[in-house]
């Protein structure tokens, strides 16, 4: 799971990985981590935000911040990507500059090197794409950047990565010895939705800074981006995720890995905020994202963004769409927000607390069974095969989400199980969380 520079591991040193586009920064980050975390594709500009990961080498732990391509004179969208890289560099304890040794030092590399020399931070120079001995002389020519010894590496094959990691540890300040991660901490919130519904804009509004790169073009976010957010006098960990365009099995390239990371972010979260575009009809993609959250068993809050664009006609139409398309999640708290104006974003905190309280709620067994007895007396299970099954008792098997098991003498129809779930919600609440009702059939002795 990704972590941020303002994480609970505040004492861990931070390494910013910078360089111009398509020199292999994310591939080298994955090599340093020893696992495929950063989204990689053989086209420039896949990474846009600054994304941090927990790394370890030789018993020492540190945070690696992957960044988008840094071009000092970039304009427009590229300039916002570069700004994220510059922020990461300023917040870091050391910088790893990645250069494509097969190309040599470009004018952009020389400009970046000048900025880094003035910055006063320790800099380690990685000459990437040195896949064999023939390219090593090209790596040696990078001494001209004035940043010390260029470490010849191949992020793709791992060549020279051990020496590079040793140099990185030497550049970083001392870190605590290896230890178990802290439990607890801020509640984890996944911010999910289809592309271009305003997830990154909302995260920037909540944090009060340009934490995620925002553009009118759909699909700007690729990697999950973690941020600590203070709303409702409480700190939350928000994860901005890539927009889900299609089912994972139909996605390709960077989109495929981004989809996997979005699914993993939902799994790692406790509650998900599904962001819908209030100015557009509820789509099949919106439905699929909600289904992913329910199947993952996570608490759920639905936020309708771009409420500042909704007129009276659209509100009436949206009311009908909610009744028709979101009837299966009537239990989910709904909040109308505007990331652009900041409208009602503070109402997210009460909705998140309500959902999490339900997600962790446990009903005492005695109270559950007295309630169940009254329910069955009033509405017994339907007859099946000429016999009416008897419900013997019930227990709550778990929480996060609440899971109930009914012990019966025969099979209970799915419609009856849904009836029990609906009455559980009516009588005990559970707003904002899926509720699972299972049946265990008890055979007669000797059968």
Image (spheres, rainbow, N blue to C red):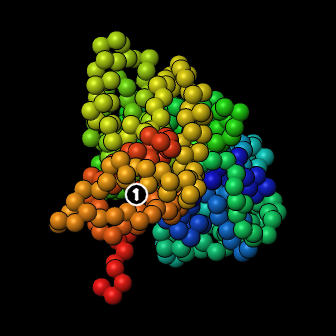
Toward the top, the furthest residue is 312
What residue lies at 71% left-to-right and 42% top-to-bottom? 90
What residue lies at 44% left-to-right and 54% top-to-bottom? 372
How many numbered callouts? 1
Q: Is residue 37 visible?
A: no
Q: Nearer the viewer, residue 146 or 42?
A: 42
Query: Is 447 situated left or right of 385 in this image?
Result: right
Quarter of the picture containing the C terminus is: bottom left
Q: Position of residue 99 (x, y in %)?
A: 56, 56
The relative height of residue 362 versus residue 387 in the rendered view (above or below) is above
What residue lies at 27% left-to-right and 52% top-to-bottom? 415
The relative height of residue 329 versus residue 147 in the rendered view (above or below) is above
Toward the left, the furthest residue is 385
Q: Is residue 391 visible?
A: yes
Q: Using a 10 Å C-alpha cutoff, classify the residue at mark 1 as few (fewer than 14 neighbours), some (14 to 19) or many (20 or more).
A: some
Residue bearing the label numbered 1: 437
Query: Is 221 situated left or right of 317 in this image?
Result: right
Quarter of the image for residue 189 reads: top right
Quarter of the picture containing the N terminus is: bottom right
What residue lies at 56% left-to-right and 70% top-to-bottom? 34
Q: Position of residue 246 (x, y in %)?
A: 29, 48
The relative height of residue 186 versus residue 438 in the rendered view (above or below) is above
């Amino acid at each position: 799971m990704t972590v941020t520079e303002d994480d609970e591991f505040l004492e861990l040193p931070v390494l910013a990985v910078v360089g111009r586009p398509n020199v292999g920064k994310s591939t080298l980050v994955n090599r340093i981590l020893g696992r495929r975390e950063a989204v990689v594709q053989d086209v420039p500009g896949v990474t846009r935000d600054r994304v941090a990961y927990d790394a370890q080498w030789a018993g020492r732990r540190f945070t690696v911040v992957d960044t988008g391509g840094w071009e000092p004179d970039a304009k427009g969208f590229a300039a916002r990507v570069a700004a994220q890289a510059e922020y990461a560099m300023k917040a870091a304890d050391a910088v790893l500059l990645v250069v494509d040794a097969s190309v040599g030092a470009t004018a952009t590399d020389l400009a970046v090197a000048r900025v880094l020399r003035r910055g006063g931070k320790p800099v380690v120079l990685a000459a990437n794409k040195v896949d064999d001995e023939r390219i090593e002389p090209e790596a040696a020519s990078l001494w001209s950047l004035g940043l010390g010894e260029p470490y010849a590496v191949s992020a793709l094959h791992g060549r020279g990565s051990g020496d590079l990691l040793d140099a990185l540890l030497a550049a970083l300040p001392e870190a605590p010895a290896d230890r178990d991660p802290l439990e607890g901490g801020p509640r984890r919130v996944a911010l999910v939705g289809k592309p271009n519904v305003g997830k990154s804009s909302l995260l920037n509004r909540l944090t009060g800074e340009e934490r995620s790169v925002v553009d009118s073009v759909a699909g700007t976010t690729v990697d999950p981006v973690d941020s600590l957010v203070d709303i409702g006098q409480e700190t939350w960990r928000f994860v901005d995720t890539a927009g889900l365009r299609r089912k994972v099995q139909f996605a390709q390239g960077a989109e495929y890995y981004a989809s996997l990371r979005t699914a993993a972010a939902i799994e790692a979260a406790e509650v998900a905020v599904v962001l819908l575009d209030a100015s557009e009809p509820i789509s099949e993609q919106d439905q699929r994202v909600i289904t992913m959250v329910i199947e993952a068993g996570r608490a759920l809050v639905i936020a309708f963004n771009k409420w500042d664009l909704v007129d009276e006609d659209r509100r009436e139409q949206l009311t009908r769409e909610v009744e028709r398309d979101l009837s299966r999640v009537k239990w989910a708290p709904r909040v109308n927000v505007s990331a652009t104006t900041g409208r009602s974003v503070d109402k997210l905190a009460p909705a998140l607390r309500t959902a999490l309280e339900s997600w962790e709620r446990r009903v005492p067994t005695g109270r559950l069974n007295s309630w169940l007895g009254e329910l069955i007396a009033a509405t017994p299970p339907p007859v099946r095969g000429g016999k009416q099954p008897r419900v013997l008792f019930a227990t709550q098997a778990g929480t996060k989400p609440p899971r109930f098991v009914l012990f019966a003498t025969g099979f209970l129809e799915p419609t009856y199980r849904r009836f029990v779930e609906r009455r559980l919600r009516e009588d005990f609440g559970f707003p904002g969380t899926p509720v699972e009702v299972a049946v265990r059939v008890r055979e007669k002795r000797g059968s």
